[in-house]
Amino acid sequence: MNSYTFKTTINCMNCVRTVTPILNELDNIESWHVDTDNADKVLHVSLDDENVNAVIAAVKTSGFEIEQF
């Protein structure tokens, strides 16, 4: 399993609810969570591969900004 962190604009629980179904549809995600208390709104993702581009595309499709740390 590979762990990745991203800076995002997912800044509240409503935002988390928006992105949840899209991230949950990705086959390569083992687990994920967003630390909305962190100033960088950090998204922590555990993947079963190295395809971070799928995560980035999913978050952007949801209307949020994302960049890998």
Image (cartoon, helix red, strand yellow):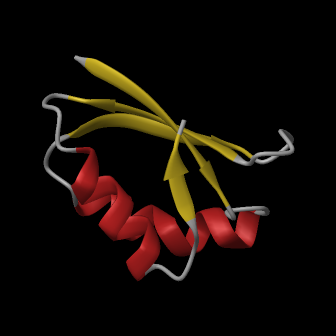
Q: Nearest the camera: 17 or 2?
A: 2
How many numbered discs, if any? 0
Q: Is residue 5 above or below residue 41?
A: above
Direction top: furthest residue? 1
**Image quarter in which the C terminus is found:** top right
Residue drawn 27% across and 45% down? 52
**Image quarter in which the N terminus is found:** top left
Q: Nearest the camera: 20 or 69?
A: 69
Q: Is residue 36 above or below residue 13?
A: above
Specify whether 22 is left or right of 42.
left
Residue drawn 45% across and 38% down? 32
Measuring from the top left, give residue 16's x and y in whole percent.
Answer: 62, 62
Q: Nearest the camera: 23 or 59?
A: 59
Residue drawn 23% across and 62% down? 25
Residue drawn 47% across and 62% down? 20
Measuring from the top left, give residue 13's x and y in whole percent.
Answer: 74, 62
Measuring from the top left, give residue 27's x and y in whole percent.
Answer: 13, 49
Specify whether 28 is left or right of 59.
left
Instruction: Determine the image quadrant of residue 4.
Output: top left
Instruction: Determine the image quadrant of residue 37.
Output: top right
Q: Is residue 64 above or below residue 24?
A: below
Specify whether 2 is left or right of 40.
left
Specify whether 57 is left or right of 51.
right
Measuring from the top left, give residue 67's x and y in whole percent.
Answer: 52, 53
